[in-house]
C-alpha cells in the first residue's frame, strides 16, 4: 500500500472523534503523538493501550504532564468532552454510549482487557463516518475487527507503517483484513492528527 499523506489529510479534515489502539511499543509512540498536540483541540481522542491494571493511571498522568492538552484516565459514566484525551484503564474495556464513556469487564478479546476492538466498534456506532481510527505498533490481532466496523460505517482508518513500528502484528493484521485506508509513518500520523484536531476559528 503506497503511503499518501495528502490523501489522508483530505479524508480526515472533518472528523468529530479519533480512536487509537496500541500494544507493544505503544507508550513511546503515544507520548510522541500526544505531546505534539496543540493546547486546544476540537474533538475527543480515545486511546486503548494494552497495559495492566495500575499502570494506566500513571501513564495518563505522564501524558498529561508531557503534553499541552488534557489527558485523563477514563472513568465509568464520564461525559465525553471535546479537547480531552481519554486513556482506557487497565483491566476494563472502554466503550462509548450516549456521549458518555462506559467501562466494563466483558470477556477479554485475544487475551486482553482493555481491548481495542471494543472501543473501535462502539465508536464506529457512535460517530459513523465522522470517526478516524488509528492502529499503532503492537503484538497480536486486536483492532482489526474494530477497524472493519469503522470502515463499514464510513469512517477512515490509518495504520502505522512497519518501519516505525516496534512490532507489526496489530497494524499488519488490520491491513491483511483490508480494514485500512492508509499506512503512514508515526511522524505523518502526527501530522494527520494535528490537522484533524485543529480548532477552526
Image (cartoon, rainbow, N blue to C red):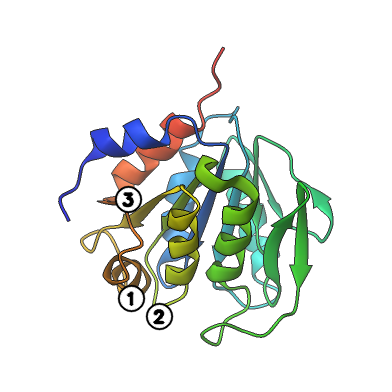
Instruction: Please identify the quarter of the rendering in which residue 24 is found.
Output: bottom left
The answer for how far apart the CA atoms under marks 3 and 1 are is 16 Å
Residue appearing at x 55%, y 87% in the figure: 111
Q: Relative to 181, does residue 188 appear above or below in the rendering?
A: above
Between discs 2 and 3, the one toward the N terminus: 2
Left or right of 9 in this view: 121: right
The answer for how far apart the CA atoms under marks 2 and 3 are is 19 Å
Q: Judge depth for marks 3 and 1 and give the one in front.
A: 1
Between discs 1 and 2, the one toward the N terminus: 2
Residue appearing at x 44%, y 46% in the figure: 33
Q: At numbered mark 3, what does the secondary structure look like: helix, strand or loop?
A: helix
Q: At numbered mark 1, what does the secondary structure look like: helix, strand or loop?
A: helix
Image quadrant containing the C terminus = top right
> Which residue is identified by label 3?
186
Between discs 3 and 1, the one toward the N terminus: 1
Around disc 2, counting alpha carbons within 10 Å, would you say few (fewer than 14), some (14 to 19), or many (20 or more)?
some
Residue appearing at x 15%, y 50% in the figure: 2
Left or right of 130 in this view: 176: left
> Which residue is identified by label 1?
169
Residue appearing at x 66%, y 63% in the figure: 88
Q: Relative to 128, does residue 199 appear above or below in the rendering?
A: above
Q: Do the numbered discs 1 and 2 sit on residues whose CB atoms are within 8 Å?
A: yes
Around disc 1, counting alpha carbons within 10 Å, would you say few (fewer than 14), some (14 to 19), or many (20 or more)?
many
Instruction: Please identify the quarter of the rendering in which residue 166 is found.
Output: bottom left
Q: At numbered mark 2, what does the secondary structure look like: helix, strand or loop?
A: loop
Image disc number at residue 74: none
Amino acid at each position: 500500500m503506497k503511503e499518501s499523506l495528502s490523501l489522508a489529510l483530505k479524508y480526515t479534515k472533518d472528523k468529530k472523534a479519533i480512536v487509537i489502539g496500541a500494544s507493544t511499543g505503544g507508550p513511546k509512540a503515544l507520548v510522541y503523538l500526544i505531546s505534539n498536540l496543540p493546547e486546544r483541540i476540537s474533538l475527543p481522542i480515545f486511546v486503548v493501550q494494552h497495559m495492566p491494571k495500575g499502570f494506566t493511571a500513571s501513564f495518563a498522568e505522564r501524558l498529561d504532564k508531557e503534553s499541552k492538552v488534557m489527558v485523563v484516565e477514563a472513568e465509568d459514566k464520564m461525559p465525553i468532552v471535546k479537547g480531552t484525551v481519554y486513556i482506557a484503564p487497565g483491566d476494563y474495556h472502554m466503550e462509548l454510549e450516549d456521549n458518555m464513556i462506559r467501562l466494563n469487564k466483558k470477556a477479554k478479546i485475544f487475551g486482553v482487557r482493555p481491548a481495542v476492538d471494543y472501543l473501535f466498534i462502539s465508536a464506529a456506532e457512535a460517530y459513523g463516518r465522522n470517526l478516524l481510527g488509528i492502529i499503532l505498533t503492537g503484538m497480536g490481532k486486536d483492532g482489526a475487527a474494530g477497524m472493519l466496523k469503522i470502515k463499514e460505517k464510513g469512517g477512515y482508518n490509518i495504520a502505522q507503517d512497519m518501519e516505525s513500528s516496534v512490532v507489526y502484528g496489530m497494524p499488519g493484521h488490520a491491513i491483511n483484513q483490508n480494514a485500512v485506508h492508509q499506512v503512514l509513518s508515526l511522524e505523518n500520523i502526527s501530522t494527520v492528527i494535528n490537522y484533524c484536531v485543529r480548532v477552526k476559528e
